[in-house]
Amino acid sequence: MNWYAFLIGLGSALAIWRVVQEQKQPQKMEWGFAALWVLFAAWLGARIAFFIWQPAIILDLGWQAFGLRAGGMVWPGAVFGAWIAILLISLRKGIGFLQTADQLMFMLPPLVVTIWLAGWFSGSAYGQLMPEGWWIPITIDDAFQLHPRFPLQLVAAVSLFILFVVIEPRIQKKLVGRRTAILWSIFSIHTLIFSFLRADSRPLWLGIAWDIWFVFVCVVWALILSWMVWLRKPEKRKQNSGVQI
């Protein structure tokens, strides 16, 4: 079994299910399709980012590089694509951006947790080498070699799952954008911490891995979302959210 594909599929299915479950009956199908569009935009963004990151694969494989089975996705592209989709959906529905994001942010927890778990089976985002011992799991790396490593992907998945389970139910729904700002902040800070702990080789810029620079952008976006929710003047917040505060 391809556990990577299975886990990504499971996370996607749970993401759509969570969005649908939160809607009243007349709107379940509508928001389910919206969640599906977000997933498609995330996949498309991840594929485009992969070709930007490794353009040589197009020269090596030609048109086969664009096949669905060819693989190759870069997560910053998925994030960018998902947020673009949320913006377009809000414009299409004629409702506020934060209100739309609140409805679709239910997708984030299952997707991110299963992506970390998928990394365990695909040899990505692995931890540092450790001395051999029965308590140290054997982990596959990006060269398909097995070594005793710190179980970074498992620790990241479990810790993030606990954070979401504990915090998400306690988020009050009265203030538009609150769920979006809090869940995105959890994701950004958690990803920043675990990105520094990764041992897999990644391109560097100014001595820092390229994906960490993107996580900094995610943190800045979390600060902007928090400002939009809590610090803007109430009149502007009401006008831009599209609902009564």
Image: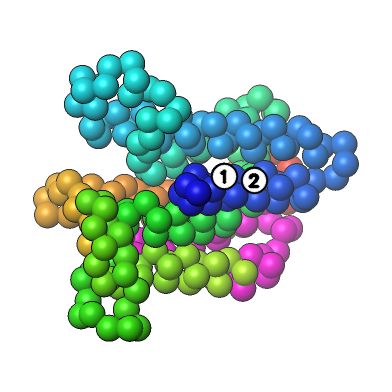
Residue flagged by tag 2: what amino acid is it? Ala
Looking at the image, can residue 42 be seen? Answer: yes
Residue at the image point whose x is 88% and y is 41% from the top: 25
Residue flagged by tag 1: what amino acid is it? Gly
Q: Which mark is residue 145?
A: none
Highlighted magenta segment, given as a residue range:
166-195
Q: Is residue 115 above or below residue 97?
A: below
How many numbered callouts? 2
**Magenta segment, principal secondary structure?**
helix
Q: Is residue 160 above or below residue 221?
A: below
| View extreme (bottom): residue | 134
* Residue 75 figure quarter: top left
Please check the rendered image and state whether residue 89 is part of the magenta-colored stretch, yes or no.
Answer: no
Is 200 situated left or right of 16 in this image? left
Is 205 situated left or right of 84 in this image? left
**Which residue has dot 1 on it?**
9
Residue in the foreground of this view, choosing between 140 and 243? 140
Residue at the image point whose x is 19% and y is 53% from the top: 201
**Which residue has dot 2 on it?**
13
Residue in the foreground of this view, choosing between 222 and 120? 120
Q: Position of residue 147 (x, y in %)?
A: 24, 67
